[in-house]
Amino acid sequence: NAGVTQTPKFQVLKTGQSMTLQCAQDMNHEYMSWYRQDPGMGLRLIHYSVGAGITDQGEVPNGYNVSRSTTEDFPLRLLSAAPSQTSVYFCASSSGLAGINEQFFGPGTRLTVL
Amino acid sequence: AQSVTQLDSQVPVFEEAPVELRCNYSSSVSVYLFWYVQYPNQGLQLLLKYLSGSTLVKGINGFEAEFNKSQTSFHLRKPSVHISDTAEYFCAVKKIKAAGNKLTFGGGTRVLVKP
C-alpha cells in the first residue's frame, strides 16, 4: 500500500500560470480532501469529496477547482495562480460513513507563486 | 461554525520533562476531537481521537488527552518527552453530523525538545 501520494513535491509558478496538484490513494477510501497549511493558521479545508462524482467547497475554495472522476484520484487545479496561494498543500483520505475514521495525509506539495 | 484555539504557538521543553499542549474549541453542536502530529517535512499523523465514552484518551507514543466538556477543552499531555517528539501538534474537531471528513484545525503548537 502506497497510501496517499501527492505530486509534485515542490513547484514554483509565476502569477497567472495554471497547474494541477495530483493526489491519489490506493485504500479505496470514499472521502478525500484538500487542505492548505499556512504558518500560524493550521490547516484549512479547500475542497472535499464524499465519493466519485461528488465534490463540495470547504473553508477557502476561491481560486481552486477539483473533480473526482474515480475513487482513487482527486486533483486540485489552480486556474490562475496568485502569490496568496503560496502554501503547503495536503491531500487526505478516509473511510467510514461519518468520516470518524482516521484521515490519512499525503506528504504535501510546497507551492511558491512569484 | 466551529473554531479551535491552541493557546501556545511554541513550547520548548527539556528531554524527559512532562509537556502539556492546550486546546480549546467552540461549537454550537457536538463534535469529535483529534490530535495530529506533523514531523518535519512530513504529512500529518493521527495521535489520538475522542469520539465518546471515557474522557481520558490514550494515543500512540505515550500521549494522552482529556476531554472536558464544561471547559470545551481537549489538552494533550505526555509525562516524559523524547528528542523524537520534536514536531508540530495540531488539535482538530469535526461536527458529528457533518458529511464527509471536514476537519477544523487549530493553528498548531511547535514542540522543541532540548537535550
Image (tube, rainbow, N blue to C red):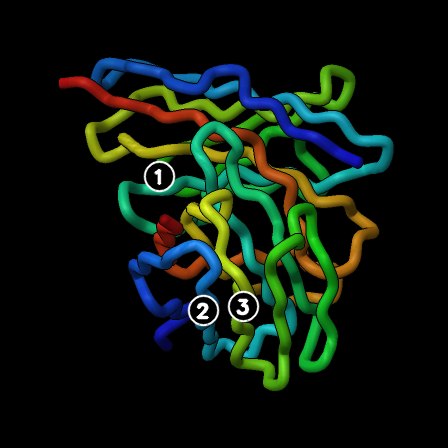
In this rendering, would A58 be left or right of B78?
A: right
Q: CA distance from mark 3 to mark 1?
A: 37 Å
Q: CA distance from mark 3 to mark 2?
A: 6 Å
Camera-side residue: A28 or B68? Answer: A28
In this rendering, would B81 be left or right of A24?
A: left
Residue A19: which disc? 2
Mark 3 Cα shell of 10 Å, populated few (<14), some (14-19), many (≥20): some
Task: Work out whether A97 lies above or below B18.
Answer: below
In the rendered structure, are the residues bearing label 1 and label 2 in contact, judged by CB atoms less than 8 Å apart?
Answer: no
Quarter of the rendering containing residue B26: top right
Disc number lying in front (3 or 1): 3
Q: Amino acid at mark 1?
A: Asn
Quarter of the rendering containing residue B50: top right
Q: Amino acid at mark 3?
A: Arg
Q: CA distance from mark 1 to mark 2?
A: 38 Å
In the rendered structure, are the residues bearing label 3 and label 1 in contact, judged by CB atoms less than 8 Å apart?
Answer: no
The percent position of residue A9, horizontal first and vertical second, equals 30, 61
Camera-side residue: B46 or A37? Answer: A37
Q: Residue furthest bottom?
A: A70
Residue B61: which disc? 1
SS of the residue under disc 3: strand
Camera-side residue: B94 or B53? Answer: B94
Q: Amino acid at mark 2?
A: Met
Task: Work out whether B22 lies above or below A22.
Answer: above
**Residue positioned 66% across, 62% down in the render:** A48
Q: Chain of mark 1?
A: B
Residue assigned mark 3: A77
